[in-house]
Amino acid sequence: MGIEHTSTSGLWAGVDVGTQSLRVLLVDDHGVIVGRGAGRLDSHRSGRRHEQDPEQWWQVLGQAGREALADAARVHPRPAGLVRGMAICGTSGTFLLTDAAALTPALMYDDARAAEGWTGPGQPSWPPAKLAWLAEHGSAPVRAGLATGRVRLEHCPDFLAARLVGHRVATDWSHALKTGYDPAALDWPAASPSGVLPDVVRPGTLLGRIDATGAAHTGFAAGTPVRAGMTDGCAAQIAAGALVPGSWNAVLGTTLVLKGVTEHRLEDPAGAVYSHRHPDRGWLPGGASSVGAGLLDRRFPAADRTRRDAAAARFEPAGGIVYPLAGRGERFPFVRPDAEAFEAGDLVDDDDRYAAVLQAVGYVEKLAYAHLRRLGARVDGPYYITGGATRSRYWCQLRADILGHELILPASAEPAFGMAVLAAAGDGPLVAAAERMIRPGTVLTPRPGATGRFADAYARFLDALVERDWIDATLAGYAKDVPLVGASGGAA
């Protein structure tokens, strides 16, 4: 694996529970990754439902933890004894209900079973909508437990942390956000279901220490501190180093998640933008789009991506435009539960269509920055990019061209790395730990003339959204006219 030899006084464990895999990283005080472990997770979709088995999280955590420790043992003879702390991130909005054991599967972040007719707070894929659905349609024990407050909502990291330390734990204010927690008031709303929701603490807070059962299962030493984490999008933001005002991180994988830093909380009447609270000070606004590489996986399942990328370079811009949704509904930079993928224009073949998908994700990303700037955010950068799609250097370059802005590929972009940094920070300042542990990345500069080459296609893309009433003409006009370079925020 090419582990770099290092000496250290401590190691930090970061755990990332994703849609398709669980990953564990062991990182030293200087940000050097000394151990890796990973295991596959299964995801079950049926109609609008999307679920995972929380017991599989636990089993894979044990496997991946031992694998990471064995990997680190090539550098450190007894790595478990060097681990000074652990933090866990999960997909934002994923939760289950528990009593003495799990009463439900994990309802995933994009599970849309409650979308029909939801008029309550937050988006219909967020936990409050699904809690209301479970209160009406869940099993008899679930309905009774919600009515009496005997069941407890646990986000993915809460479930795993509780298993590690042997008792229930608080959640962090990052995972709690979509569940309805008010990060400004630092409290749950008064109308929240009594007894169901967990206590909430600052990310980095000590939740407990790994007990004998947790140690036997994972290989980590009993007594190892387990600290409150953040969502996977925030974890990737930490790993990138986008932690000061004006900086942003775009995570592009199955979907696109964009997060940045502002001194003041952004207010978005449309509900597309939500703001996590910064563990130090300020806010982490952003949103999660449903576009991304998911449509590529579905539309071109056996594609040679390297060949496709080379072919796509012949279509700049593509002969038509698409909106690249793999399923129904969009969440950011606008909220339309009824949105569906579309094509418009003259796409001559699958290479042209593939190019149109890559470009469309760049257009959505550019629109998102325009929307954020219109709300008052600084969007002058730096811009970091992370996620599985960054393996395509062509797509990375294309996004820089469309945005007309430098993009930075961080040296260690994995959410699990961000959790290791958070574990190292603990109760102290996160920015200081990040400055110590995060290494410089690779800078991608827009190619000369490339941004202008996509201007007309981007304008047609925006017009197509206006025609479908997905965005208003004012936002479209603003997005066409305002460059990102040098943009310092301010509502229009």
Image (cartoon, grey):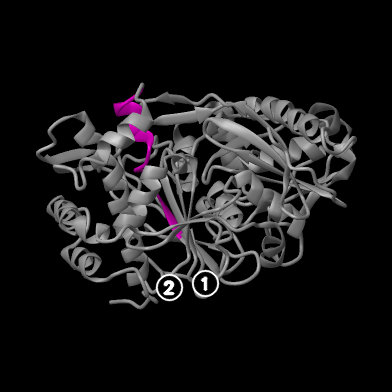
In the image, farthest residue toward the top: 302
- 488 magenta-colored: no
User: In terms of depth relative to the viewer, which is nearer, 471 or 406?
Assistant: 406
Q: Are marks 2 and 1 in contact (CB under 8 Å)?
A: yes
Number of the label disc, if any, that sits on residue 378: 2
Magenta-drawn segment: 286-301
Q: Which secondary structure lies at badge 2?
A: loop
Disc 1 marks which residue? 245
Number of the label disc, if any, that sits on residue 453: none
Q: Which residue: 79% across, 33% down?
A: 69
Where residue 182 appears, as percent x and y from the top left, is: 55, 62
User: In terms of depth relative to the viewer, which is nearer, 331 or 128?
Assistant: 331
User: In terms of depth relative to the viewer, which is nearer, 103 or 452?
Assistant: 452
Answer left or right for 250 relative to 447: right
Marks 2 and 1 sit apart, C-alpha to C-alpha, by 7 Å
Where residue 336 appears, as percent x and y from the top left, is: 28, 49
The quarter in which the C terminus is drawn is bottom left
Q: Residues within 10 Å of mark 2 (few under 14, many from 20)?
A: many
Q: Residues within 10 Å of mark 1 (few under 14, many from 20)?
A: many
Q: Which residue: 75% across, 35% down?
A: 163
Q: Which residue: 23% across, 69% down?
A: 478
- The correct choice, above or below, for 446 with respect to 8 in the image is below
The quarter in which the N terminus is drawn is top right
Q: Identify residue type, mark 2.
A: Arg
- 292 magenta-colored: yes
